Amino acid sequence: MSLDLDAFISEIQVRPAIYDTKLKEYFDKSLKRQLWIELCKTFVDNWSELEVAEKDKEVQKLQKKWKHLRTCFKREYDIQKQEPSGPGSKKRRKYLYYDQLLFLRGSVEVRPTSSNSDSWQTQIDNTEEAENVNKKNGTPQATTRFKAGYKIRSEASKTLNEGGAVGARPTSSNSDSRLTPV
């Protein structure tokens, strides 16, 4: 199978459900399967004479080729964004199909992300101090962190606050003496 990549890219471009993640149709698996079969009918010789298993292999080959083209474009796109332009820039060859694949810009750009764990980590970072020094007598105080409704104190700082030596065992009968209910 010799694939005309220029024609292949043009055919993909007229089927945005294959590449545009912003479209509702992108998430319709049956529609995408139908689009890939249309592409196979166009680019695979003797498509109608192939067995079902052979057709599946041909679809996978085209999908793999598309993934490779998209990955190469993404790599080049990231390089193009980072390189300075103008007379001081370094001359280099651009990816062969870069200009033809520019329609992918919207689907390969990295979108900013956010999650609940970011705000939780910020809260922990704001309340946690590595070592506080007691201003009155210069001894380290307990470091506190929050975990599931409990404050966790390190063993060394707990024994310091209780007046014991560093490394001494706590005298509490609690199974995990580091956990103190909030």
Image (cartoon, grey):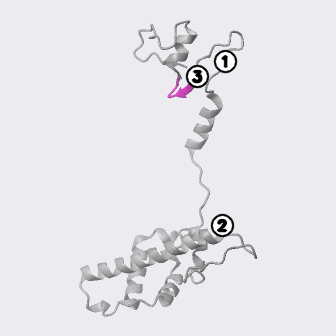
Query: Residue 133 shows which numbered tag?
Result: 1
Label 2 amino acid?
Answer: Gln
Q: How far is mark 2 from mark 3, CA to CA?
A: 42 Å
Q: How far is mark 3 from mark 1, CA to CA?
A: 10 Å
Q: Position of residue 46 (x, y in %)?
A: 30, 93
Q: Residue under circle 2?
A: 82
Q: Is residue 31 left or right of residue 108?
A: left
Q: Point out the stretch of residues depicted in magenta.
A: 144-151
Q: Is label 1 in a helix, a strand or a loop?
A: loop
Query: Residue 143 shows which numbered tag?
Result: 3
Residue 149 included in the magenta stretch of the image: yes
Q: Nearer the viewer, mark 3 or mark 1?
A: 1
Q: Quadrant of residue 56?
A: bottom left
Q: Position of residue 165 (x, y in %)?
A: 52, 9
Q: Position of residue 117 (x, y in %)?
A: 55, 42
Residue name at image x 67 percent, y 74 percent: 90
Residue name at image x 61 percent, y 69 percent: 79
Residue name at image x 57 percent, y 84 percent: 100
